[in-house]
Image: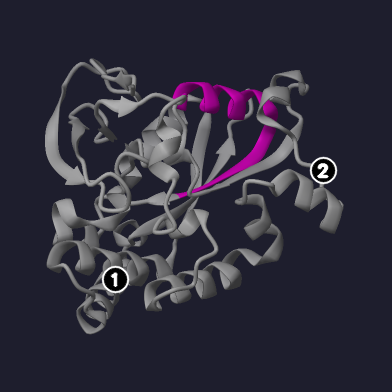
Amino acid sequence: MSVLIHYNHCPACNAEQIHPALSAIDYTVSKQPFAIWHCDGCSFRFTQDIPDINTIGSYYQSNSYVSHSDTKEGLINQLYHLVRNYTLGTKSRLIQRASARMQAEKNYGINLIIPNSIDQLENNYFNAITLWHVLEHVHDLAGYWQQFSRLIAPNGKLVIAVPNYTSSDAEHYGAYWAAYDVPRHLYHFSPASMEKLALQHGFRLVKLQPMWFDSFYVSMLSETYQNGKSNLLAACWQGLKSNFKALFDNRECSSVIYVFEKIAA
C-alpha cells in the first residue's frame, strides 16, 4: 500500500499560499492522475500526494520510462539515446543504471560515493557538484540543498539541469506537457523559483544555459500524450518555436541548466 505525502506548505519556501494549478496523468506507468500545486510565494510547483520514498519505485518500473532503460524501440527512444550519448557521454550513461557503481569501478576506475556516506565527508569537500535532471526526483529537497551548502567550498559551483514549466512548450501543451512526468517528478521549477531556492541556501545564479534538444524530445512525447499518436512535424515545429524564444531569453527553454556559485561568508 502506497504511503502518500501531502504538503500543507510549499516544499521550497514554506509559504502557506499554495493551491492546485492543474492535474496531469502518469502516461508512462500507472495512468493515474496527480494534482500539481502552485506556490504564490515563490512560483514553485510540486506534485501533491506523492508516493513516499519507499513506494515510489514501482512508478519507475517500465521500459517506457526511457531515461531509466536501454530500449531503443521507436523513433522517440532512438532520438533520446542519440542525444543522451552526445550530451553526457558513456560514463554518465553508466551512472544512471542500477549496477552503476560496480560498472563504473570495474570499467572506468571511477569511485562513486554511496548516498549514505555523504554525511561523513568533510565540509567544503567539493569545488563543484552537478545534477542532470536529478533534483526533481529527490524527496528530501531541503536536505539536499543543506548538503550542497555544506559540501561545496566557498565560490564553488553547483550545476543543476531541470525542466522549466514556464517554457513555451509547457505553456502550449498544458497538462499534457511530458516534462511534468508525474509522480516521478516531485517538483516543477521555474527560473524564478530556482533562483530564490538557491539564494535561500547561500548560492547566487551566475549563468543560465538552455538545453536545446529537450524542447524537441519533450514536444514529441507531449504530442503523443495529447493526441494519442506521434506527430513529428508538429513536435518539431513546437520545439523550434520554444527554442526561438529561448534565443532571446534563456528562461524560455524547455529545460534549463543553472550554474550557481556558493556565496563566500
In three-dimensional space, the C-alpha distance between marks 2 and 1, rounded to whole angstroms, equals: 36 Å
Crowding at label 2, few (<14), some or many (≥20) Cα neighbours within 10 Å?
Answer: few
Identity, as a three-letter code, of the amino acid under mark 2: Asn
Residues 261 and 2: in front is 2
Placement of the C terminus among the 4 image quadrants: top right
- Label 1 secondary element: helix
Which percent across, then down, holds residue 51? 34, 27
User: Disc 2 marks which residue?
Assistant: 111
Residue 227 location in percent, x, y?
Answer: 13, 68
Name the residue at the bottom extreme. Answer: 233
Q: Looking at the figure, which quarter contains the N terminus?
A: top left
At 23% across and 84% down in the image, what residue appears? 233
Would residue 248 appear left or right of 18 to someone viewing this image?
Answer: right
Residue under the point 39% across and 78% down: 75
Task: Look at the numbered discs 2 and 1 and tell me whether their residues touch, using CB distance below 8 Å.
Answer: no
Which region shows up in magenta? 140-161
Q: Is residue 75 above or below residue 190?
A: below
- Residue linked to disc 1: 220
- What kind of residue is marked 1? Met
Rendered view: 38 above or below 182: above
Where on the picture, by quarter, is residue 118?
top right
Q: Which mark is residue 167?
A: none
Q: Is residue 212 left or right of residue 130?
A: left
Residue depicted at x 47% and y 39%: 135
Q: Secondary structure at mark 2?
A: loop
The crowd level at tag 1 (other Cα within 10 Å; few <14, some 14-19, many 20+) is many
154 lies left or right of 260: right
- Taking the magenta stretch, the answer to whether it contains residue 105 is no
Front position in the image: 108 or 144 = 108
Residue 37, percent from left and from top? 19, 32
Q: Position of residue 263 (x, y in %)?
A: 58, 31
